[in-house]
Image (cartoon, rainbow, N blue to C red):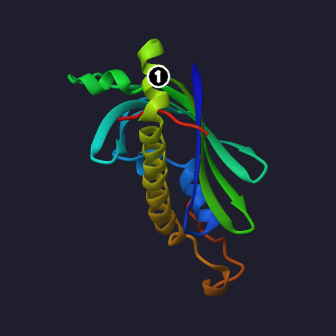
Amino acid sequence: MTRSVRAFLPVPGDPTALRRAFVGDPTRWLPDARRTGPDRWAITVRAGQLSRQVDCHLGAPWRAGGSQWRSLSWQPIAQEDALERFLPSLEGELGLHVLEGVVTVVLDARYEAPGGPMGSALDSLGLQRVARVTVERLLADIAARLSAESLLTADLVIPEEEEEDKDAPTATTEHDERAPLA
C-alpha cells in the first residue's frame, strides 16, 4: 500500500538568496551530504536518537509559480541491523515556496511500507509517527543549512547604494500521512 507524507517548514532569510542556495550545490545544504555520483548523495536521515544513511537522488531544479522544485528520492544504504528492513524507499518532490516574502521548504513524497502486509500493519500501528518525525527533522536540517548558505551568498551581492561608480559594471555571485524512517 502506497502512503504519502507531506510536511513544510518556514525558512528564515532573504527569499532571493534562499532561492539561489536551493538551486545551487545540494552538497552545501543536504544533511551530512557526500556526493556519490551525478545527482546522487549519501545523506543522513534522523528520527530521535536513530539515524540512517540513504542514497539520495536529487533532480535539477524547476520552477512552478512561486516555487522552486527538485525531485527527491532515496534508497536505504545497507546496514547490518534489523532496523534496515523498516526503512522504506521514498520518492517525491522537495520545494522552496515563496509567498509575499515568506519562504517555506516543502516535502511531498510517497513510499511503500517495507515488509509486505506485516510492514504495512506496523506502519499503521505507529511507525508513521516515526516517519513524520523523520521528515520534519530532514526539513529542519535542510532549512537551517539553506538559511546559513543564503547568508553566505547574500554577502557576495553588492547593493546598488554602496557602489562607488553607478555606471561601472557590478559583480554579483550566482550561486498526510507518513513514511516509517528509523
Residue 74 visible within the image: no
142 lies left or right of 108: left
Residue 117 seen anywhere in this rendered image of the structure:
yes
* Residue placed under numbered mark 1 in the picture: 121
Q: Residues within 10 Å of mark 1 (few under 14, many from 20)?
A: few
At x 48% / y 49%, what residue is drawn? 136
Depth check: give the residue in front, 156 or 151: 151
Reply above or below: 22 against 89: below
Quadrant that contains the C terminus: top left
Number of numbered tags placed on the structure image: 1
Q: Residue furthest front?
A: 125
- Name the residue located 48 percent from the left edge and 21 percent from the top edge: 120
**Residue 118: where, in percent of width, then height?**
42, 16
Q: Position of residue 129 (x, y in %)?
A: 45, 41
Residue plotted at (58% across, 47% down):
7
Q: Is residue 182 above or below residue 99?
A: above
Query: Which kind of residue does numbered mark 1 sit on?
Result: Ala
Spot occupied by residue 145 in the image (x, y as percentages of width and height): 44, 57
Name the residue rendered at 50%, 72% in the picture. Answer: 155
**Placement of 3 over or under 103, stated as above or below:** above
Query: 107 left or right of 122?
Result: right
Give coordinates of residue 10: x percent, y percent.
Answer: 58, 62
Residue furthest left as drawn = 80
- Single out the residue that lies furthest toward the top: 116
> 179 or 37, which is in the foreground?
179
Left or right placement of residue 11 versus residue 127 in this view: right
Image quarter in which the N terminus is found: top right
Q: Secondary structure at mark 1?
A: helix
